[in-house]
Image: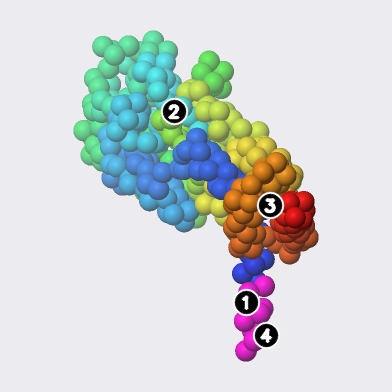
Amino acid sequence: MRQINAADSMNTTALKNFLRVYGAPIAIVVLGLVVAFMFMAPAPPKKITLAGGAAGGAYAATAQAYAEVLRGYDVEVDVVETAGSVDNLSRIRERKVDAGIVQTGLAADLDVSGVASVGAAFYEPLWVFHRRSVRIETLHDVAGRKVAIGPDGSGVRVLSRLLLDEHGVGEGRYSAVPLAGAAAAGALQAGEIEVALIVSGPTAPYIAELLRDPEVALLSLQEAHALSRRHPYLAEVTLYRGVIDLAAIHPRTDVTLIAPAAQIVVRDDLHPAIQSLLIEAAKTAGNGGSLLAEPGRFPTSQLTDIAISDEAQRYYENGPSFLRRIFPYSVANFMERAWVLVIPLVTLIIPLIRAAPPLYRWRIRRKIYVWYTDLRELEATGRTATTVEERMEVRARLADLQEETGKVEVPVSYTDDLYRLRAHIRFVAELVDKLASQERHARI
């Protein structure tokens, strides 16, 4: 039992000694950490809002796919149904949503302040379907026809007007119908319109239906190469024979299409970590390629018409950060933000560690040497005392000093200094007694 108590006592003493040496440096470092944390970059949000598109459309499906990827990183995503690209861009700029999918080709005519692109995610070609009874060989032939070009607020309307204008078919030279997607396809099959300009991915069910419909034809755009040169955000793509339905051979021949890209647009103040996650989500969704693009084509910093964010540019040049390659998202993100603490920590810790032992020795010895001031004063008073009463007072003060120093606690390594002090007190006491004895003998 005594051995256990002795061990506990030794542990307690060791802890006290450690705190005496390093307590102040530890406190300073902790204070430095608190101050550094106050200036550390903010953590990424745990929830974001993502603008998709109309229900059942490619944008809505893509937004849901991205949301699933981000939820795997513990980031909750609220997918918002919208009217399309123009609406998405407006919501992002007005800070109503954090990010959204926007068709390329809109930046020239719309306000893009306060937004940035993190890259193109997939091709979304322009399909020019028409009734077989209507002779359409180029976009010039759309003049005088009843044409579905999409509703206001949609990217297809902006692109349709641009291409028709470039072909000399101004807005007044055709009858515009504000239909898009499945609605436009249905109207074309029903004969309500003659031409439908649709922007959609090749996997949309209504695209396959239009290709199978014997009353509907798909225009192969001979000017696609020229358009891609005139507009860098547009790409010439080929819809190969049978790629939609190989059993039925749809389409029957290779078809040349012009394709804008769907790009991921974000608020320019969106946290960089979330921007990287959106790129990774696009890579997860599109890395296997598509009917129009080879594997690895998307996401890309090309084809965008909105300036790429700094974080996205860094990602495309270097890939995920070194820490993201090693650690989970949350850990890597914290470490990337916390690295700024290293410099102040090192700056504080190294000199504090070096200064702690000397400071500790000075503190301990000061507890001992502070008594020497009183001891020297008492010695001087004892030597110059002329009466018995004066020497008795000095002797009493020396006794008090001896009692006080007996209560002083110091580490074992400083015990010799303490005992030396006590010996000196005893020496002065004996000196005062000797002087008093000599004075008594002198009087006799």
The reply to whether discs 2 and 4 touch (Cβ–Cβ < 8 Å) is: no
Q: Which of pointers 1 and 3 lies earlier in the amino acid sequence?
A: 1
Residue 8 circle label: 1
Instruction: Decide if residue 230 is on the left or right side of residue 78.
Output: right
Q: Amino acid at mark 4?
A: Gln
Residues in magenta? 1-10
Q: Which of pointers 2 and 3 lies earlier in the amino acid sequence?
A: 2
Residue occupying the point 29% across, 33% down: 96
In terms of secondary structure, what is the magenta stretch mainly?
helix
* In this view, the mark in front (4 or 3): 3
Which residue is situated farthest in the front direction here? 444
Q: Looking at the picture, does residue 9 appear above or below residue 281?
A: below
Instruction: Decide if residue 67 is on the left or right side of residue 7.
Output: left
> Distance between the Cα atoms at labels 4 and 3?
31 Å
Looking at the rendering, in which quadrant would you find the C terminus?
Answer: bottom right
**In terms of depth relative to the viewer, which is nearer, 43 or 276?**
43
At which x and y percent is residue 442? 77, 51
Under circle 1, the secondary element is: helix
Residue 368 circle label: 3
Residue 3 circle label: 4
Looking at the rendering, in which quadrant would you find the N terminus?
Answer: bottom right
- Indicate yes or no whether the magenta region holds residue 4: yes
Q: Amino acid at mark 3?
A: Ile
The reply to whether discs 4 and 3 touch (Cβ–Cβ < 8 Å) is: no
- Asked which quadrant contains residue 51, the reply is top left
